[in-house]
Amino acid sequence: MNYDTSLYVENLQKILSEPLCIQGNPQYLDISSSQLIEDELLREAKDQVPPSDPLIKGLGLILESMEKGPFDLTRFGINELLKSYLFKVNEENQEYCTMCYLNCIYQIYLYGLMEYYPFTDLLWEYLSLCFHAMGIYLVDHKLDKGCQVFLNKVSTMGKLAAQKGLHTSSIQHFLHNLEIRANESGFPDLADNAKNHRFNLETF
């Protein structure tokens, strides 16, 4: 693996600048989303291939850095992934776009919880700081539906962190600040959700 941070970031930026497949591909048969698979549909799907997805390519590079490289490469990778999200999320795509990006972050987080990963504390501390900035950004830009998706996923990670014995003070602080900002911005449902997640964070 190349440890040049400039080349690593440039490569990620190039990948993540590609158009996202955030609406999925109705021409590709996904078995998990099909309740009834008809023979004709199955025959048509024989030679179908999924679209090229820059998120999967970018995620692969970040996971590779977690396996082989220093934590700084992982940090740069996460930063570029989240910057790409903030560039691309908008009022029309906010829920699905948020889900796609947060699923990538969740995979990174789960990898970081593996027993042999040496930088779990550093990873969780960095993610917690990013979550705070991102949540406030979404509220300030009136992307409350996307923020609901974001909040639910982050709270899931926070609860898992508590179960693993990781600190949750940063997430508690984030949830409290998000509750206040959401109330001030006229999103009472989002504020209530943040409050509930804060109270239930360490309830197993």
Image (cartoon, grey):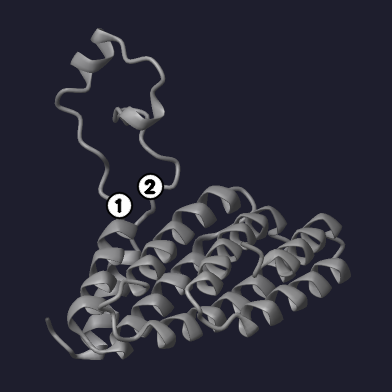
- How crowded pointer 1 is (Cα within 10 Å; few <14, some 14-19, many 20+) is rated as some
Residue pointed to by mark 1: 53
| Label 2 environment density (alpha carbons within 10 Å; few <14, some 14–19, many ≥20) | some
* Disc 2 from disc 1: Cα separation: 6 Å
Where's residue 51, x and y in %? 27, 43
How many badges with numbers are in the image?
2
Residue visible at 86% across and 59% down? 188
Give, as a three-letter code, the residue at label 2: Cys
- Rendering coords of residue 25 (x, y %): 36, 35
Compared with 146, 126 (above or below) is: below
Q: Check if mark 2's residue and mark 1's residue have beta carbons within 8 Å.
A: yes
In the image, 53 versus 104, the foreground residue is 104
Q: Which of pointers 2 and 1 lies earlier in the amino acid sequence?
A: 2
Classify mark 2: helix, strand or loop.
Answer: loop
- State which quadrant residue 138 falls in: bottom right
Q: Amino acid at mark 1?
A: Asp
Which residue is disc 2 drawn over?
21
**Image quarter of the C terminus:** bottom right
Could you tell me which secondary element the residue under label 1 belongs to? loop
Look at 25% across and 89% down and name the residue there. 70
Q: Classify residue 123 as left or right of residue 201.
A: left
Label of residue 12 in the image: none
Q: Position of residue 164 (x, y in %)?
A: 47, 73
Q: Classify residue 46 as left or right of residue 190.
A: left
Q: Position of residue 189 (x, y in %)?
A: 82, 55
